Image: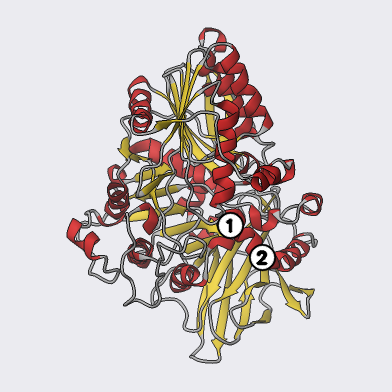
Amino acid sequence: MRIFLALVLAVGLAGCARDAARQNMATQSGTGARHAHAQLYLSATGPEAGARSFLFSGLDAARSSIALYSIADGELAIEGRCDGALLLRQETSNEIAAQRVAAGKSFAATLGHRSRGDVWLEPAAETSRCTLRVNSQRGAGYDIVLEREETADPALAALDARRDTCLLPDTARLSPLERVFYAPRDLSQSCVMPAGTPRFLGNALEAFNAKVEALTGARLSQAALDAGNPTAPIDFSRAPQLDYIWLSYLNLRADYSGYMISRMLAYHAARGAVVRIAVTDVLMLPFDRAIYEELAARYPNVQLQLFRWEGESADARENPLHTIHRDQHIKVFATLARDPARSRVIMGGRNLHDPFVFDAPRDLSAFPFLRSYKVDQQLTLSFFLAYEDFEIELRGGATVRSVVAHLASYWNRDHASQRPRTFSINAPGGVAQGGMRHFISVPYADGRAQEALFVELIDAAQSSIVFTAPFLNLPTSLDAALRRAAARGVEVRIIARVDIDEPAGAFSAALNKLFFEDYADLFTIIGYDPHPRTLHTKIYVFDRQLAVVTSTNLNQRSFLHDTENGVMIIDPATVARLESVIEAYAVRGIPMGTEIDIPFAMRALLGIAGVRRLF
């Protein structure tokens, strides 16, 4: 689906080149090394009364920038003043003009009709506060305050600045898989945390209700879910007090589940919670954008990152398609509550929209601002395909806070390279007690460190590798590692989907079939198509000792192009439970052989290495 959309949206390359040009301009310097970038959304009417100010970060930053986005029809006239120096950039006739503004001096800019980041504000390191006056053609003007996070919200700044020291055990007495688990690497990793007893969320409705419960303190009834009314009353009487909410997905949609969650986010934003939402820019259609951009404009403490890779010039010249092809694929829902026992982290393979909740679309025809799915039009951007997926939920305590702090290192990544800020450093003196580690992968920024991790895991396995993944298209290094595993007698069992009824599903299905053709003589491969759902789970188990629950597919897209995350777990009870999830899929599947029917033209096209590297 995503490569299909990337090809359709190739016209966006000109705008991306413009943004890259902005990025290469010289600017004011501060302490640190990264470029800290934020997006501020402005409407014609302004924030809700009593809303918090907009926070920008200078953490470890040599440069801080704030891109202004307008969701207003018509122009917005901006007048501003800061307590320190500012650099103002505004595009005029496809040229970029920069204006240096001294402390206390006024500046002005104009945002065109629904302007998308054409004006940047770059506060100097000593600038802590700016006030903008926004005047529209269709309403009274309003003021919005921009404040440096480090001075305005020290608690959030401390969470963002957290850096842990991982005490690593002596490797001499460790098993091969334990050595991989504890090893330092370029991959962004948390330290080892207690595994506890994670809640498994295999049922789609249960998984959605787990998120609802984290936000409201109660579940939606089956009757409410069946009715599918996105404007129905929501009971917040048992809602926790939340300080911080994190949503990170490939995309979010304007459908029943998306709109319900947005209403719950608005409730907490109105009470001061900082809400951070990371999604992929090119996959957000106008329906989808409207919900979350309006939320960010109503509540400046709703921080929105619409991810679009803006590579360094050499990489961009190598393949300019990367700019709209590389996606934000980290899958996490997290809340930090005043009562730590009510904090939650939910992660795995699911996106957060109706195809990951229901077997059939809700009738939303009475709500023209929401998306109407079409089950019989799979080549449209409003297609509906129900997914069978899996997540784990962690509750309360230090583990949840550690994961959330680690996610902050991705939120506060360098805008130029997309590399997360360093979250953990290593020191000797630890004890091997097992547990879990959260990881974040940005392959083009960390030297494809997740790929190296998976190669090490495969090479460390001595008896069995069992996994389920919907997309199979191995990088060369993983192909070699799996073949080495087969040669030394490791039992490899794979559960994967066969039919892929998505846009561009013909490509993905053909790649899976090429994998079956190549490996069915070496490994046990089970095809699993759980109609009316389609497999989307990503769980990997090695020697019944170590498991990975992740957003990562076993394809080149996940290892070369997309941001990903997951947890490695060494805990006998949890690993056994995860393997049983895979086995439950296997008993309902069909063994695959090497006799595979793939159209000649598709086989020839996918024989081109450059094409296969996209998937």
Question: Circle 2 is placed at which residue position?
Answer: 123
Count of number-bearing discs = 2
Q: Element under label 1?
A: loop
Instruction: Give the residue drawn at x 66%, y 65%.
Output: 123
Asked if residue 448 lies left or right of residue 359, the reply is: right
Q: Is residue 519 above or below residue 221?
A: above
- Among the two numbered marks 2 and 1 on one chain, the one whose residue lies closer to the N terminus: 1
| Circle number at residue 470 | none
Q: Amino acid at mark 1?
A: Ser
In the picture of the structure, the residue carrying the numbered disc 1 is: 57
Residue 575, horizontal then vertical, whole percent: 38, 24
Please rate how many residues cluster around mark 2, counting C-alpha atoms within 10 Å: few if below 14, some from 14 to 19, many from 20: many
Residue pictured at 56% horizontal, 46% vertical: 508
- Residues 424 and 214: in front is 214
Q: Residue at x 26, y 69 (%)?
A: 229
Give the camera-side residue of 579 and 447.
579
Q: Cα distance, mark 2 to mark 1?
A: 10 Å
- Please tell me whether residue 489 is drawn above or below residue 345 in the rendered image: above
Tell me if residue 613 can be seen.
Answer: no
| Left or right of residue 68, residue 367 in this image | left
Tell me residue 288's x, y (percent): 47, 67
Quadrant location of the C terminus in the rendered image = top right
- Snapshot quadrant of residue 607: top right
Decide: marks 2, 1 in contact (CB < 8 A)? no
Q: Quadrant of the N terminus?
A: bottom right
**Percent x, y of residue 302:** 46, 64
Of residues 27 and 253, the one drawn nearer to the viewer in this rendering: 253
Residue drawn at (60%, 29%) of the image: 518
Residue type, numbered disc 2: Pro
Compared to 305, does 387 lie above or below?
Answer: above
